[in-house]
Image: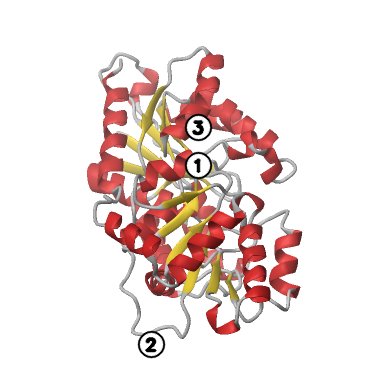
Amino acid sequence: MNSVILDISRLISRVRHATPSGVDRVEMAYARGLLGIYGDDLAFAAVHPTGRYGRIGNEAALAYLAELERRWSQESGGRSQRSIMQVLPWMMRLLPRTPPRLLARTLPGTGVQRPVYVQVSPHHLTDRHKVSGILRTENARFVCMIHDLIPIEYPEYARPTGAALHRRRMDTVAACADAVIVNSAATGRSFQPWIASSGRSIATHVALLGTEPLPPAADTPPPARPYFVCLGTIEPRKNHLALLNLWRTFAETLPAAQIPRLVVIGRRGWENEQVLDMLDRCPALQPHVEELSGCPDWQLATLLRGANALLMPSFAEGFGMPVAEALSVGVPVICSDIPAHHEVGNAAPDYVDPLDGPGWKALILDYAGKGPRWSAQMARLARWQAPTWQDHMAIVAAAIQDLQRRA
């Protein structure tokens, strides 16, 4: 009997994609981390794109995980999605099997330990009936990760139905979970009202997301001009508009040779008409702003390592993975002054109110010339400690063990 079951529904749902989202990377890290801790005692399961739930054989699951990692490290983010026909062999190979029928389901009190079901993504959490059915089928306790409650707290930054859908997810977690993992104390505070209203005892464990080691930079000539990177899905809460307006001001007020480049890396999201119009149709930005819808890990590493700083002007974040990624390779960060960023960056970054245009302008120009503020952060970077997946998974393993001790 497997003591831990990991849901990889999200990764299977991404079978057609060449580059990962942040949630994809977290689910992959859990697959690798839990496998390292539990070995053959770990089982994989999923709600397949066909809607069917069941176990995924370890051989098929591990082969698929390796295939995804190969894509992420090698393929260009500009590549179109694979067709259904191209991914059909994987869809067939990953069809779930009915979970084994265990003696403990029919004979309570046998001493057989109940498994712990771990889900990292929000996939199918809107369907409480399905989640409850899975837990009954597996006779399992439930550990679920919560990444953020942004669609509820800031509905103006979500799709029109985003807040209602996310409330359903949080209702499911509050009704079904025995423990939750949150990626920051800020996320944990946001979820507390759901725990209180549920009337249930749900253990909350804060575990900062680990920082994946980035590949070395490619051997490329130094850039002709200093540049900055903004990394993340292009959506309203990321506040790309502030940066684009700032770069338009640079184009209108500075000699062309003194304007740093801005490299915007991320797929286009939703509710972005003004941002997309500026990217597509603003002549003043064209010589100075480059948009990449995505890129393989080696290209991201090269771009990030060569930047004068990462810019992260978000209005809201659950964690802020790009901040950790940049700091981990010694690249300074200028980011918005929000709780999640402080948890990740501690004293290293320069923090600015996301609406403080003059503050952003002054810092960017200082960093473009590697001025005093840039030098001060470079000195602070030496004292910054990257959160690790090893530490994160140790907290998860302790949460699982705590549930396994219960009768």
Which of the two discs, 1 and 3, labels the residue nearer the N terminus? 3
How many angstroms separate mark 3 from mark 2 (CA)?
54 Å
Give the labeled residue for mark 1.
338
Coordinates of residue 333 in the picture (x, y in percent): 42, 58
- Residue 99 left/right relative to 267: left
* Residue type highlighted by circle 2: Pro
* Residue type highlighted by circle 1: Ile
Name which residue lies at 46% across and 26% down.
177
Say if 152 sits above or below 73 in the image. Answer: above
Coordinates of residue 249 in the picture (x, y in percent): 66, 68
Which circle, 3 or 2, is nearer the viewer?
A: 2
Which circle, 1 or 2, is nearer the viewer?
A: 1
- Residue 352 left/right relative to 241: left
If the image is split into quadrants, where does the C terminus sit?
top left
Count all numbered tags in the image, as a single digit.
Answer: 3
Rate crowding at label 2 as few (under 14), some (14 to 19) or many (20 or more) other CA atoms within 10 Å: few
- Residue 192 left/right relative to 171: left
- Helix, strand or loop status at disc 2: loop
Decide which of 400, 325 is in the foreground and name it: 325
Residue 80 placement: quadrant:
bottom right
Decide which of 358, 135 is in the foreground and name it: 358
Give the labeled residue for mark 2.
221
Residue 305 placement: quadrant:
bottom left
- Helix, strand or loop status at disc 3: helix
Which of the two discs, 1 and 2, labels the residue nearer the N terminus? 2
Say if 196 sits above or below 399 in the image. Answer: above
Give the labeled residue for mark 3.
134
How many angstroms separate mark 1 from mark 2 (CA)?
36 Å
